[in-house]
Amino acid sequence: MFRILLTVIALVVATSLLYRFIVQKFAANKQKPFKEPSKMVGCAYCQLYVEQDEAIYSNGQYFCSSAHSKLKIK
């Protein structure tokens, strides 16, 4: 009797672990929604290209960071 109970518990645990693995595998494969690429702009200080939404706009120019926006342009 004990052996049957232990076997049933082991089967339930194995099934639940397998189910979780399969669900996580398929959830990870879902494609993320497509994001339109934004325009790339060059930093006025170092010429590094960054997306326009992430760039800092100051004095009519784009910069890659707030530190570069505060420095004098070369």
Image (cartoon, grey):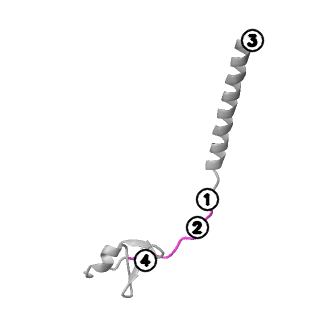
- The image quadrant that residue 3 belongs to is top right
SS class, disc 2: loop
Lower position in the chain sequence, tag 3 or tag 2: 3
Tell me the kind of residue under disc 2.
Lys
Task: From the image, tell me which residue sits under label 1.
Answer: 32
**Rendered image: mark on residue 41:** 4
Question: Is there CB contact under 8 Å for labels 1 and 2?
Answer: yes
What residue do we see at 65% from left, 53% from top?
Answer: 30
Q: Is residue 17 visible?
A: yes
Q: In front: mark 3 or mark 4?
A: 3
Tell me the kind of residue under disc 1.
Lys
Lower position in the chain sequence, tag 3 or tag 1: 3
Residue at the bottom extreme of this rendering: 60
Q: Is residue 46 visible?
A: no
| Residue 42 spot, x, y in % from top left | 39, 77
SS class, disc 3: loop
**Gap between marks 4 and 2 measured at Cα:** 18 Å
Question: Is there CB contact under 8 Å for labels 4 and 2?
Answer: no
SS class, disc 1: loop
Assess disc 1: are there few (<14), some (14-19) or many (≥20) residues with their C-alpha within 10 Å of its C-alpha. Answer: few
What residue do we see at 70% from left, 31% from top?
Answer: 15
